[in-house]
Image (cartoon, rainbow, N blue to C red):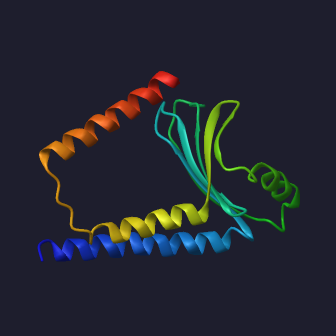
Amino acid sequence: MKYRKLRIAWSVAWGVAAVLLIMLWVRSYTRIDYVYCQLFNSPTCGVFSGLRCLSFVMEQPGSSGSAFDTGSHSLKDSPLLARELESETSVYGLRSFPGGRALVVPHYFVALLMALLAGLAWFHWHFTLRTLLIVTTLVAVGLGLIVWLR
């Protein structure tokens, strides 16, 4: 079997990521965790985990410097914040707010995606050049439609 060790490493890495995300999911019932960073004059990117959802946030650049921050807040310490987030996270999807956008997805969706990626290496793919050209064309058309609709 060709590339067997690489397949095992791929599966283990995505499997560990899925297990860690499940642990974060369980933790989201009692805590809100976040990580965000900004490099020089780029938009601020962040990931927030809390109340059974993950939020991937991108905000407009606020300053010209660089910043990196992590943190965690207990839901017991801030019941007002918990109620506010609970009301906002009942609907998943792409959201816009003043100064940025956020993609809100449930933890189980990302965990299932990671588990799928873990098993993906074990499928035996046999592509022809024609298949690759067709898929490349379809991806290009899809991306073009996304840009055109925006």
Viewer-nearest residue: 69 or 79: 79
Q: Quadrant of residue 60?
A: top right
Judge from the rendering whether residue 48 lies leftward or rightward of residue 18; answer left or right: right
User: What percent of the width, then of the height, locates residue 144?
Assistant: 39, 27
Judge from the rendering whether residue 94 lies leftward or rightward of residue 64; answer left or right: right
User: What percent of the width, then of the height, locates residue 145?
Assistant: 44, 28
User: What percent of the width, then of the height, locates residue 72?
Assistant: 68, 63
Viewer-nearest residue: 27 or 36: 27
Q: Quadrant of residue 70?
A: bottom right
Residue at x-position 78% and y-position 53%: 85
User: What percent of the width, then of the height, locates residue 117?
Assistant: 38, 65
Above/below status of 6 relative to 45:
below
Residue at x-position 32% and y-position 66%: 120
Residue at x-position 44% and y-position 65%: 114
Residue at x-position 55% and y-position 39%: 44
Q: Quadrant of the N terminus?
A: bottom left
Viewer-nearest residue: 70 or 48: 48
Above/below status of 136 relative to 108:
above
Above/below status of 78 relative to 138:
below
Above/below status of 102 relative to 49:
above
Question: Please, which residue is most extreme toward the right here?
Answer: 80
Question: Please, which residue is most extreme toward the top here?
Answer: 148
Total numbered badges shown on the rendered structure: 0
Judge from the rendering whether residue 38 lies leftward or rightward of residue 135; answer left or right: right
